[in-house]
Amino acid sequence: MARSHLTLAALATSAVEGLDVAAAQPFSSNRHGDFDTALITARDGSHYLVRVPNSDAAEAAQNAELTALASLSSGVRSRLPFALSSFVGQTLLRSPDGRPARRATVYEFVYGRRVRLERLFPGPLPASIGRAIGAIHSLPSGFIVDAGLPVVTAIDSLRSVVGVMDRAAATSLVPAQLLSRWESATDDTTLWQYQPTVIHGAMNADALLQSDDAVVGVLGWSDLRVGDPARDLSWVLSAPSPETVDQVFEAYGDTRHGTDIGELRRRAMLYAELELAKWLLFGFDTKDSTIVDDAVQMLDVLVKSVQGHTAAGLAHETGPILDVEEVERMLDQRPQVAFDHRTRSSLSE
C-alpha cells in the first residue's frame, strides 16, 4: 500500500532536524510505483521532496544518485548553468516483517517544468539544451575518480556496442542492412578515438527542466560517470525536426570548442539505433513475443529510414531514429527503461 503524503511528511520531519512542515501534497510523475513521493512546503516557503523506494532496484538507483550528488561539490556545481538537487536528510523506516528496511530521503526541490520531446522545436530551448549538456561534459573528471564512480574508456564503449550487436545478430531478426551499417561503424577506428568526458549517463528530455526557453535544472544523476559524450546526446535524434537536432549540436559545439561534431553525431546515432536492438533483446530475455514483434517492426522502419545511407555507413543526415510514440511505448513496456526514465523526472514539478 502506498504511503500517504502525511506519512511522508512525518518521515521528512524525522529525517531533517528542525524542518517545520506547513503543507504536504502527493507528488508522483512515476506510473509504476517505484517510489512513494510527497512535495513538502516548509514554514519559510522552501520546498522539498521526500521519497521512499518501493523496490530493491529503486533503492539501488536512489543510493547511486545520492553518491553522485555528494560528488558534485559546490565548486563543481558553480561550473554548471543550471540547478540540481541536494541531499537534505534521511531516516530509516521500520520493517516489522523482518525485510531490510527502506530509507526515506529528503531532497531540495528543483524548480522548473519538464522538457517535452514532442514539443522540442527550433528556437532558444534546443540551443540551451546543447549548452547545458556541453557544460556537463566540460567538467573536470577528477571528482568522478575521487568518488569512485565509473570510468568508461572508448575501448570499453566499443566492446559494449559489439556485445549488443553480437547478441542481436544471434536472434536472426535484425535486418542484414542494419548489421552491416553497425559493423561499419565499429570497424571505423577514427570513430572510437575520442576523449571520454564527464557525462550525465541517463540524459533525455525528462532529465531536463525548463523555464521559458532555457534549461534551469537537470535531474536523475544516478548514472554520473566518465564516458562517451555521445551517449548524452543520442536521445536528441528523436526530436520532431532535423533543425532542432542541428541547433542542439551546434550549441554544444560552441560550448566545447575542438569537438568533432560529425564523429560525435555518428556515435550518437549508433547508440540510438542500438536501442532498438536492446528492445529486441529485452523481448527475448523476457520471452515476450509482443515486444519481439514490436522491435522487429521498428527495426524494419529503421531500415527504410536509412536506405541510401547504409552503404556509406552512419550519416548525420538520416532522419529521426525513434518517433515520440515509439519511445513512449518502449518506456511503458520495458520495466528497466521505464524505471530509468521515471527516476530522472522524480525531482521535478
Image (cartoon, rainbow, N blue to C red):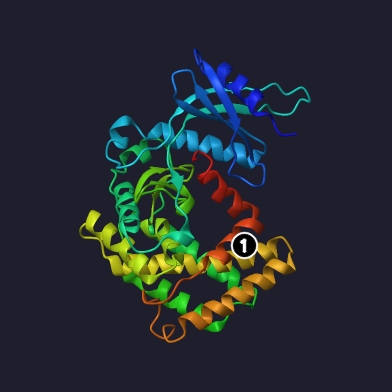
Please state the horizontal and vertical placement of residue 310, each as a whole percent of the image. 44, 83
Please state the horizontal and vertical placement of residue 212, each as a whole percent of the image. 36, 48
How crowded is the residue under tag 1: few (<14 C-alpha within 10 Å), some, or many (20+)?
few
Q: Can you say which quadrant of the picture contains the N terminus?
A: top right
Q: Nearer the viewer, residue 336 or 129?
A: 129
Q: Nearer the viewer, residue 274 or 74?
A: 74
Query: In the displayed structure, does residue 345 sit left or right of residue 35?
Result: left
User: Taking 76 as reference, is 253 above or below it?
Assistant: below
- Residue at the spot x=33%, y=47% of the render? 136
- Residue at the spot x=36%, y=74% of the render? 316
Q: Residue furthest top?
A: 18
- Residue at the spot x=56%, y=47% of the render? 342
Q: What amino acid type is highlighted by mark number 1?
A: Arg
Please state the horizontal and vertical placement of residue 202, each as a whole percent of the image. 47, 50
Answer yes or no: is residue 62 visible.
yes
User: Taking 189 as reference, is 194 above or below it?
Assistant: above
Q: Nearer the viewer, residue 112 or 169?
A: 112
Q: Which residue is mark 1?
A: 329
- Residue at the spot x=42%, y=31% of the render? 70
Q: Residue furthest right?
A: 97
Answer yes or no: is residue 256 visible.
no
User: Taking 85 as reference, is 133 above or below it?
Assistant: below
Q: Residue furthest left?
A: 257
The image quarter in which residue 224 lies: top left
Query: In the displayed structure, does residue 251 sit left or right of residue 296?
Result: left
Secondary structure category for the residue under label 1: helix
Query: In the displayed structure, does residue 278 sit left or right of residue 67?
Result: right
Please state the horizontal and vertical placement of residue 189, each as a whole percent of the image. 34, 71
Q: Disc count in the image?
A: 1
Q: Nearer the viewer, residue 87 or 144?
A: 87
